[in-house]
Structures are given as C-alpha cells and as structure tokens.
Image (cartoon, rainbow, N blue to C red):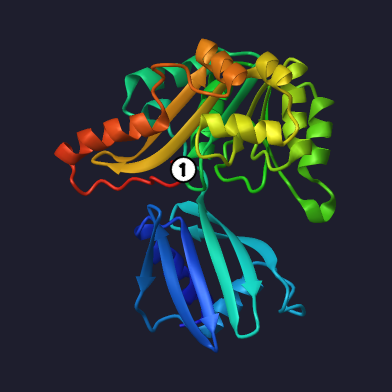
Amino acid sequence: MNMQERLEQLLTYATQKKASDIHLTLHRHTLSIQLRIYEQMVELVQDLWDESLFEYVKFKSGLDLTNPYIPQNGQFSWKLGSQVLYCRFSLIPNKHLQTGVIRLLHTGIHLPIERLTSKKEHQTFLKGLIHARRGLVIACGPTNSGKTTTLHAILHAIAQRSMHKVVSLEDPIEIQDPSYLQLQINEELGFTYEKGIEELLRHDPDVIFIGETRNSYTAKMVVRCALTGSLAFTTLHASNTLEAIQRLEDLSVSTYDLKKTLTALIGQRLYQSPKGKECIYEILSGQDLQYALEHKAYPKGFKTLSNEIQEALDTQRIQDPQARFDLQNL
C-alpha cells in the first residue's frame, strides 16, 4: 500500500467516526494518533500508520521540508467518494517530538436552517435574519461549536432568495457554496483579511461574511462594513455572548459603535441528539442586547447558554442517555 492509499485510509476512517481533527504525535520515530470526536480525544491503537505517513502529510500540505524545526501550517484537499474533504495541517516540532493536527473540513454541505436546531423559537429568529439588510451578526463559541455552519446556512438562504450581492472572505473556505462569491485568504500572495476587506468595500456588496474576527483591525473593519450600510456576518472565539462583548471591546471596538451596528450575538454549542448533530443557541438581540451593551450583564430573566444547555440536557437524559455535550468554557 503506497502513501496516498494509507492517507486516504486514515481520512476515510476519521470521517466515518465523525472526527473533526486528527492529532498526530511523532516521538522518537513512533507515531501515535488521536481523533477528536464530539470534543473527546479518542486514542487509536493501531499499527497501520507510521512515521512515513507523518512525513507524507507534511509534503502533501506544502510545508517547507528544508525547515523542519519551525512551526508551519499548510493545507490540502482530498476527494472521498462524492465529497471533497478540505484539510488544514498545523505542525509544531520540538527536539525529540513533532506534533501535527489535521483539521477536517467537509465542504459542500448545505444545511437548511431547520436542520441547525430543533427549537422553533431559534429557527424563527435565524430565518428572520434572512430579511435583514444592514447591521452586524456575530456567531461566537469555541472551536467546533458550529459557528461557521450556522452563518453559512443563513448566507445560503439569503443568496437563494434575493438578488443581493453576497461575498465572503474566509481562511479557509470551510463550506463551498456556488450561490455566492467566496474568496480564499492567501497571505503568501498578500491577500490578507485586511487587504480583502478593503477591496470588498470598493465592490459595493450587500452582504459580507468575514470568516473570523481575529484581531483589532479586522474587528474595526467588520464594524465599518456594517456602518457603510452592508449586512455583515463574522465569527468570534468567545464562550458566550456576554464574553463576546468584552472581547470586541478588548479589540478596541467602542460600545457606541456596537450599539449602532450590532443586530445579534449568537452564542452556541454542538451536541449529538437522536436526530444527529444540533446547535444549542444563546441569542442576544433587541432590547436584551442593548441592556447587555449598557450594563455588561444579562438582563433579568434572560435565558443564557448555560440555561439552554441544561434544558436540552434534561430533555435528552430522558430520550437519549448517551447524548454528549460540549460544556467547555461555560
């Protein structure tokens, strides 16, 4: 079996197990593998894959093999049956240890809003965003909480139902959608988030999706997109909506600008229900949002993400005792 077949075998196994990441650790020529499945790390006891596979992944990802002692990032795509698997690879080497993580991104998966969550109230709110024409919507949560999936479902619906120009800037493009224009960030060629946003604003978009707000510049530019009359969407790493407000202010976005632009903050987690993966949402909008911006606290009676998760847990303990929740950072 050649290296290409071995890698395909590993990728196929990981996708069958619904893994989001493959963790590779090479210690003194011995390779160990773990899969991240629903936020749990699962060790693979195996003798199929060895050091040569690790080296092949580095080559396939386009890493600079002449510099083996520096952290690097790369990417590659793989066709598995009818689907395309987009893979990001991150490498951190040490003296006697190399660790690599393959992030698995299933492109081309379009979920209708009804499939995101079974809670009718949240379905109604997300569908309402399809008809918004200005403002700023931010999905927040930890890695693998479904932020991008939620926003893509909304963007897809907007692009399908209107003549408005929808454009995204992403790194990487996690879900490919031919119904609107998606631009891939390429920092090696100078096409950064900063450059991309500046170019986008000259092309008169109606709806803009910035894949992730990572720094102060991006945060300010996302707000600027909303201030110029576009409907802007982005994701942010924060454990809940209240923390997202603090993160935005830490990134030098003023409370005044947030009050003028923010339409909604959507905090979320993924869990495995009897129907498959679902999102649990904490939605901060309207008067509740304005109160949170003013007082840096939830309004009285607001149903927080912790409340939503507890409610879902109570239901699932009856219907499915094996339901697994990501309770991280609550």
The C terminus: image quadrant = top left
Task: Give the residue number, with chain letter if any, for mark 1.
Answer: 145
Q: Secondary structure at mark 1?
A: loop
Question: Residue at horizontal 54%, vertical 63%?
Answer: 102
In this view, which residue lies farthest toward the bottom?
A: 28
Q: Is residue 180 above or below residue 164?
A: below
Identify the residue at image location x=51%, y=28%. 266
Residue 269 in picture, x, y percent from top left: 42, 39
Relative depth, front residue between 21 and 71? 71
User: Does any portion of residue 188 appear in the rendered image?
Assistant: yes
Q: Position of residue 97 (x, y in %)?
A: 59, 81
Residue at the spot x=76%, y=41% of the render? 193
Residue 263 appears in the rendering: no
Q: Nearer the viewer, residue 233 or 162?
A: 233
Amino acid type assigned to the residue bearing label 1 in the image: Ser
Please give left or right for residue 101 compared with residue 309 in the image.
Answer: right
In terms of depth relative to the viewer, which is nearer, 237 or 235?
237
